[in-house]
Amino acid sequence: MQSKAFNISQNNRGNITNLQLSSDSTHMNWVIDPDYLASVNYHDADKLFGEFTATINGHTFNSIDYVPSIDNNETSSNVTFKINDVDFIFNYQLKNDYLEWNISVVNTSQQVISLDNLGIWTSLAYVMFRDLNVKKNANQSAAVFPSISPDFTKLAVTRRDNTNSNLGVYATKGKILSVGTYNEYNNRFFENVSPSLDGLLFHQLILAGGYPDNNGPKNDWIYSQESITLELNEHKDWQLSIAQFTDNDDFYKVANRFDHPTVKFSPLVTDNQSQVITFETNNNKIDKIIDQSCVNGNVTAVELTNKMENNVLMYSPSNFGEHKVIIELTDGRQDMIVFNYMSSIKQLIRNRADYLSEHSYAGKNGKVPYSFTPVSNQGEALGKMNFILQACLIDTGISESAHKIQQVEESAVKYVRSKWFEDGDFTKPTKLYGDFYRVMDLEYIAHLYYLLSQCPADCLELNSPKDYLNWAAEVFDTRVNPDRHADERGKTEAQMLGQYFLFIEDLLKDLKKNGLNEKFEEISKSWKSATNRIASDSSNLSAAMTEHFYDNAGFGPAAGALALSNHQEAAHIYGELLKANIGFSNDFRAQSPDRWWEALSYMVHSLWGGVTSAAALITGRALGDPELVKAGYRGTVAVLYMYDSNANTTNRILEPGDAASTYSIAGPNLNRPDLSRDRFGQSVFASDGGIFTRLFPDGYTGEDDWDMGEELVAYLNGFGQETFIYTDENGSIQVINGSISENNGDTMNINSHAPYPNRYIDLTNGTTFESKQATVVYNTNTNGFTN
């Protein structure tokens, strides 16, 4: 099929196997290509675009087992499957500048039937190619961000290098319940090759059901799992339109063209704040607005229609946890949003510090003496210690802070040093992985000793702050100096960027301040060499490849490091990857940085979601780019959900202070339906066998927070303190991580939503105002802040 907008190819089963935009000079295929699957030995012909699975009266059928009839011409195609007295009809019609996709299910039997499950494979180009040309992964692959709604579901299929154009999928008829995924992957980590991980996600539109019996979310009251009943000769119909869009704003403009309302809202509201929702509709008006939340397993509903004025709704939510707002139009169609209502983030920080001190520290007589559990050879496991120190340094309300600092100090001296270094020699890392050590681990240790150096001397028992600054410098030098390593692997890893971009500037400043000039010069040289090298090769996106063929744990730190080292042009290049990586959706959880390995589905990952979001903040702040800062904020809100004890839609309910590192956004997660829309740790996959048995030889321990903590340190130093303003294209002042009140024309109150307000940053004018006040005054004439 061909039109002025699209070139589309189908195979002999009617699957769409190639979908290109006519105007796209790169000729990207926006659907999964069966030829690529064959080339990497993936056997997934049953999941190509247009295949499906259906459960009819309790019996499951897969379309791959049936031969369809096909009738097509240059601008349309009709594909019909006859399965168990039910017709499944897929009609593709090329319109002027979009593809219209109609789905019909017809009961041709002589009895009432029940469709307990119906999932249509909509296999868009979410691919991590097994290809050393990283630019292929950036330019020929897409992230997929779903917004699920009763009548207005839409998917933003966003090219990973953020170049135009992108692809939008917009529901225009029928109810879509959810979007599921299946992950196909290959991980050769234990073969000592790098990159070692590739894979792809197949997306499935859920039109009925979604989950095997008793093997899905138990507490998910937000998304329907209802079946479909078809009377004799009855049919159900769905329609979707597939069209181009350029950027986030244009995605919603195109949606509006297909009669979708535009709904803007805050993804996070904390105690004593109001939710503000704005609406734009076409011909239909809003008939009813209902806020739903859940208390003790009971869903409560509050009608808010009479609070709306001029298409703006402002209200104070009740009941902490997830909130679903249903917007019903006068024609009966419904849209929805999902936001999080959290209690005090400051209290969350304090609860977490208390929990780790009381439950995680093993002490002298623990199974692994002086460790913070769960233990791991990987440095990420030390993030919880770094968090405790940073929290105690920033929050004077942390209870028994000196005791908590001393617990961390004891572990850092008596456990960390002896485990990761031969005889405690910071120049000789221990080979914890058989015949090699992992240089990346050292940045977490350097950060640990650096934070100890910032603690008051009277809170330390074993060494002085300056001793720890020396230790931090020694470890950091080993982390970034290739000359300190004998083998090629160590030399190569030492030159890779990592999350150390979050604290290197502070470390260098304190080394110079304390007269440690030799270490200052050595580390500065390594830092400059690394950033210069990444900057000079930025057009090739080489830093986006790590152990994964394409990885936000690579391009996130690259963007942040380049921004901090004043490589603005290179930072902009990697910043575009961040914009395409961080989600936008009507559900705050689907706004996380895109990643899949730790959940085998589109997911929230606490550590790398948080570090990626921090990189977006840092890069946006340096470049004066509000879109990056907004993306960083969206991603941060999703990450905070991993610590939220008030969340009630997940199977894994957290007690205050507990945490889980991973949330599977997909519903269902077709690799592990029991993990769909739930929080967990990656060791839960140990029972799946294969590589996970080797990664987690102790099986699933139930300790889901092993790699958490560093992302909260990043939060405390970023959105935990900073509020941003900028002037939009209409000349209006907008706020990120805050709100405006008492707007008097020339002056307005800017209210910070940071738990520890310290800085107000004007991205448009490039100015920073330091104040610990939760509200400051901004003057639009002088572009200045005052207390």
Image: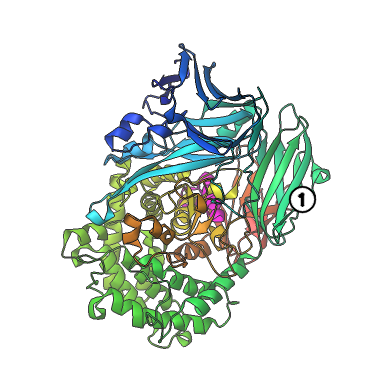
Q: Position of residue 94 (x, y in %)?
A: 51, 17
Q: In the visual, does 496 lie left or right of 239?
A: left
Q: Position of residue 358 (x, y in %)?
A: 52, 79
Compared to residue 562, the image places residue 516 above or below, namely below
Magenta region, residue range: 621-638
Which quarter of the image is occupied by the C terminus?
bottom right
Q: In the visual, does 326 lie left or right of 417?
A: right
In the structure shown, which secondary structural element does the residue marked by tag 1 occupy?
Answer: strand
Q: Nearer the viewer, residue 146 or 166?
A: 146
Residue 486 picture quarter: bottom left
Residue 99 in view: no
Which residue lies at the image location 44% right of the left edge and 46% below the top edge?
A: 578
Q: Which residue is mark 1?
A: 301
Inspect the magenta stretch and tell me whether residue 629 lies in it.
Answer: yes
Compared to residue 415, the image places residue 310 above or below, namely above
Q: Position of residue 31 (x, y in %)?
A: 42, 30
Which residue lies at the image location 23% right of the left edge and 69% below the top edge?
A: 431
Q: Nearer the viewer, residue 56 or 596?
A: 56
